[in-house]
Image (cartoon, rainbow, N blue to C red):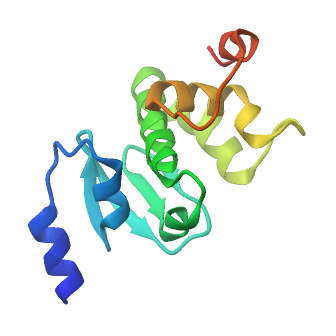
C-alpha cells in the first residue's frame, strides 16, 4: 500500500523526468502520457507507455522511456489503425527483416522522436527511418 500511495503523491502529468518514471512502482506520467509499470519482459506503447520493471536493470533505462514515448508520436502522426498495422503488430510479434531490432525504420524514428541518446544512427539510417 505504501508504494501505491507514493505513486499517487508523486504523480505529475507534466513530468519530464525519466528517473521519476523509473522510480515509480505502478504508474506515473511522462510528457503528458500515462505510464503503467509492468512485469512483462518488454516495454511497449499504445498511447500509454507500458514500461517493464526489467527496464531498470538495462544499461540505459532512461532511453527505454524515451523510446516508448517516441512511439506515441508515431501513433499521433499515423493514427491508430496505421500505427497498429505498420508499427505495433510487427514490433510486438517481432515480424520483419532479420536486421537488428533497433535498426528497423519504425524503431529508428521512435528513437529520434523520443530523444534517445544511447543509440546513434548515420544519416542513411535516419533517412530510412523517416
Residue 23, compared with residue 122, is above or below; it is below
Q: Position of residue 115 (x, y in %)?
A: 46, 30
- Depth order, front residue of 127/87: 127
Q: Which residue occupies the extreme bottom position in the image?
A: 1
Q: Position of residue 61 (x, y in %)?
A: 50, 54
Q: Is residue 79 visible?
A: no
- Depth order, front residue of 123/36: 123
* Quadrant containing the C terminus in the rendered view: top right
> Image quarter for residue 126?
top right
Q: Position of residue 44 (x, y in %)?
A: 52, 52
Lateral position of residue 47 relative to residue 42, left or right: left
Residue placed at 72% from the left, 16% from the top? 122
* Quadrant containing the N terminus in the rendered view: bottom left
Q: Position of residue 34 (x, y in %)?
A: 28, 52
- Depth order, front residue of 48/2: 2
Lateral position of residue 43 relative to residue 34, left or right: right
Residue placed at 51% from the left, 49% from the top? 64
Lateral position of residue 129 relative to residue 68, left or right: right
Q: Which residue occupies the extreme left position in the image?
A: 9
Residue placed at 68% from the left, 22% from the top? 121
Residue 88, compared with residue 56, is above or below; it is above
Residue placed at 76% from the left, 49% from the top? 94
Amino acid at each position: 500500500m505504501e508504494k501505491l500511495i507514493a505513486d499517487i503523491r508523486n504523480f505529475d502529468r507534466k513530468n519530464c523526468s525519466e528517473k521519476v518514471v523509473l522510480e515509480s512502482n505502478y504508474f506515473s506520467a511522462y510528457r503528458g502520457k500515462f505510464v503503467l509499470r509492468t512485469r512483462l519482459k518488454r516495454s511497449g506503447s499504445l498511447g500509454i507507455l507500458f514500461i517493464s520493471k526489467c527496464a531498470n536493470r538495462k544499461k540505459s533505462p532512461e532511453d527505454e522511456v524515451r523510446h516508448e514515448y517516441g512511439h506515441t508520436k508515431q501513433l499521433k502522426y499515423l493514427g491508430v489503425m496505421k500505427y497498429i498495422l505498420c508499427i505495433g503488430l510487427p514490433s510486438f510479434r517481432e515480424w520483419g527483416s532479420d536486421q537488428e531490432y533497433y535498426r528497423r525504420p519504425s524503431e529508428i524514428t521512435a528513437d529520434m522522436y523520443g530523444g534517445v541518446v544511447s543509440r546513434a544512427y548515420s544519416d542513411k539510417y535516419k533517412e530510412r527511418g523517416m
